Amino acid sequence: MNYQHFKSLENMYLMAPANKIYLPKILIKDSKSIISIDVKEDFFHTAGAVHGSVYFKLLDDSAFFAVNSLEQEVFVLTVSFTTYITRPVSQGKMEAIGKVVNKNKSQWIAESIVYNDDKEVARGSGIFIRSKILLDDIKGYSK
């Protein structure tokens, strides 16, 4: 396991401009990542619960970084992602756990589950491929 690679990915993620809104915490391990955010009213739709885009972000990001934990040269890309939202969330913390479930020569499949107060509130899975973008060229990633 390359702990420096994991820390570099974590740093890169936290530097993403979109994360100024969510203020996430992230932990990356070998083929797994955990991302959490505190629920804020800024994330709500007009019916007073978290908007689906927040669920998607957590699901995709945690699956993505589980995959990129295994790829040390280039940034991976999400090719497709299926999301299932099973419960509304309006308070507390949302935590997504992503893990790689399959890898072949050209792609990875990863799954993710979002929890709120230890209850599953969403799940999803996606297909990821290698890009041509070198990790060393991305702001925040440094070995």
Image: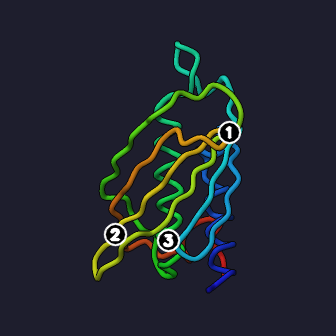
Q: Residue placed at 61% from the left, 65% from the top?
A: 139
Q: What secondary structure is found at the residue carrying circle 1?
A: loop
Q: How is the image coloured?
A: rainbow
Q: Residues within 10 Å of mark 1 (few under 14, many from 20)?
A: few
Residue 136 x, y percent position in the rendering: 56, 77
In the figure, residue 77 lies in which quadrant? bottom left
- Residue 129, labelled with which disc? 2
In the figure, residue 126 lies in which quadrant? bottom left
* Viewer-side residue, 62 vs 114: 114
Q: What secondary structure is found at the residue carrying circle 3?
A: helix
Q: Residues within 10 Å of mark 3 (few under 14, many from 20)?
A: many
Residue 13 x, y percent position in the rendering: 61, 59
Residue type at mark 2: give it. Ile
- Of the two numbered discs 3 and 1 on the same chain, state the one appearing first in sequence: 3
- Residue 117, labelled with which disc? 1
Q: Is residue 124 left or right of residue 79?
A: right
